[in-house]
Image: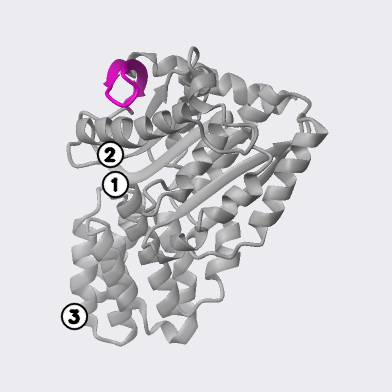
Amino acid sequence: MIKKSFVLIFLLFYISGFSQKIINKNLESDILETTRNLKIYIPEGYEKNDAENYPLAIVFDAEYLFDAYVGNSVLFAAKDKAPKQIVVGISMKESRKKDTYFNINNGSLTADNIAFYQFVRDEVIFYMESTYRTSPFISLIGSGTSANLITHYLKEPQPFINSYICINPTFSDFIGQQFQSFNLEKFSKEDNTFYLYTNNSTSFSAKKQTKIGELQKGLRSLQIKNFNVVNDTIVTSSSISAISEAIPRALTKVFQIYSAISKEEFEKNVKDLSPVDAIAYLENKYVEIEFLFGGNLGIRERDIYAIEKIVIEKENGDHLREFGKMILKIFPTSPLGDYYIGRYYETGKMYKKALKHYKIGYGKMDPSDQNSDKFYENILRLGGM
């Protein structure tokens, strides 16, 4: 209980700091033939870097999900667990029933549901992409019947949503058949990454738990390339508490590729790789981060050191030069790329080439860097040869 209270206090601290970055926009909709209010959060630093793009998150039920999602997105970005996001919330207080309450007799969308679906797809996303610097990565977030509506975007013949975050979902009795009609195999043909998050909860009625549990069981059996299913169960007596827990748990999974290589990721995906494959794994991770999330991180030193041992200790360190070149390709301002190339040449007793790269690397370092003296020792050691 103390731990959860601390997290809530921490989130409130972050939420209080972004209030001045919220833009209210009344968007006129030709599809809905009315005006709908959007709340738009622009992340800190957006105005300073014209070259950086940001993932777009679209939050249904903005009245109670928007602040919670933005607060978590700010916290995750501050902790380097996710990229900064542009978040747009759609106010649905007066229209939720019309927008998302499906036909209970067959589970299909009503004419009003379809209109709202198209409003989001064709007008909200178009407005955000044409007005702000967004990356290709788009998330939809909703709860209850809004979460059910979000699943229908899975049937688009050309997938354009990357993460479908369905919190405390209220599904129809026909949800299993609907998922079968979505042709999820099409995601395996896309050169992209997709996530579907659903949560069950002990706070739900027995009937609702059973319905979600059966869907999650069916999803668990899917083995589709590029399509990541996250089946979650939250133990709590409150549906509100389930929402507060589901958002950070969903973000953790959806942006897992963005985070530095964790112990779990290393054990599962990296430790048994050859040097060549380990280098390729690291390069692909950062190429995908830049493609999906629109920002060039370089490479975190933590991730370089995670791969270092494999490259040095396996195959006699023969791939140190390739390792250094890969680092320079993605993070040219880092001295570590030149260091590993220099170490490769020094190991092969090509001291002049080694000294050249050690000097280049040292020249990139800030004199106040505590590692600069160690780097300079390489130059002194070889300078006298």
Figure check: 313 above or below 118: below
**Circle 3: residue type:** Lys
**Circle 1: residue type:** Gly
Task: Work out whether residue 170 or residue 178 is closer to the camera in this orientation and state it.
Answer: 178
**Circle 2: residue type:** Thr
Are the residues flagged by discs 2 and 1 in contact, CB closer than 8 Å? yes
Residue 303 percent location from the top left of the image = 44, 59
Are the residues flagged by discs 3 and 1 in contact, CB closer than 8 Å? no
Task: Work out whether residue 74 or residue 112 is closer to the camera in this orientation and state it.
Answer: 112
Q: Earlier in the sequence, mark 2 or mark 1?
A: 2
Secondary structure type for disc 3: helix
Q: Is residue 70 magenta?
A: no
Q: Measure how far apart labels 2 and 1 are at the Cα level.
A: 8 Å
Magenta part of the chain: 23-42
Q: Could you say which quadrant of the image residue 31 lies in?
A: top left
Residue topped by disc 1: 294
Judge depth for marks 3 and 1 and give the one in front: 1
Q: Measure how far apart labels 3 and 1 are at the Cα level.
A: 39 Å
Q: Is residue 170 left or right of residue 298?
A: right
